Image: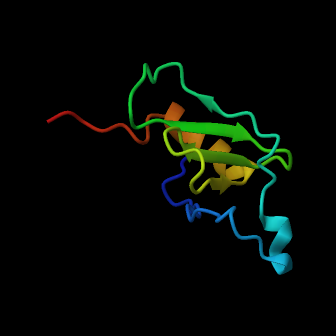
Amino acid sequence: MSTSNARIDTSPIDTTRADPAHSDSIPDLSTAVWRKSSHSNGATNCVEVALLADGRVGVRHSHRPDEAVIVYSRSEWEAFLAGVKAEEFEVGTA
């Protein structure tokens, strides 16, 4: 599956200001279990992911857990993972 034409909204959801008119778009992060890759080995530029209660996936900076969280739908996250497995995002060495 190619995701090169897929459009994924990577705009962070500001979880610090809830808009009552769009309360269904604000994820409940209170029960999120955040995981960091075992391949991080203490690196400083790591992200953590969590499967949210509503089925979406949250992504945040591991060293700034109180800042913005980017939230993806399950299908967006699955498209991203498929792209990683297909090596669509590999960067060549110079």
Residue 1 in sight in this render: no
Task: Check the image and report above or below for 30 versus 6.
Answer: above
Residue 18 image position (x, y, % from top left)? 77, 70
Frontmost residue, 18 versus 83: 18
Residue 89 in sight in this render: yes
Frontmost residue, 88 versus 32: 32
Image quadrant of residue 49? top right
Task: Check the image and report above or below for 28 versus 19.
Answer: above
Residue 7 image position (x, y, % from top left)? 56, 63
Left/right placement of residue 19 relative to residue 42 reads right
Quarter of the C terminus within the rendering:
top left
Frontmost residue, 43 versus 84: 43
| Residue lying furthest bottom | 21
Residue 8 image position (x, y, % from top left)? 58, 60
Left/right placement of residue 34 relative to residue 61 reads right
Count up the numbered dots: 0
Residue plotted at (68% across, 64% down): 16
| Residue lying furthest left | 94
Residue 45 image position (x, y, % from top left)? 40, 38
Residue plotted at (77% across, 40% down): 32
Residue plotted at (85% across, 45% down): 53
Residue plotted at (72% across, 50% down): 75
Left/right placement of residue 42 relative to residue 61 reads left
Quarter of the N terminus within the rendering:
top right
**Color scheme of the displayed model:** rainbow
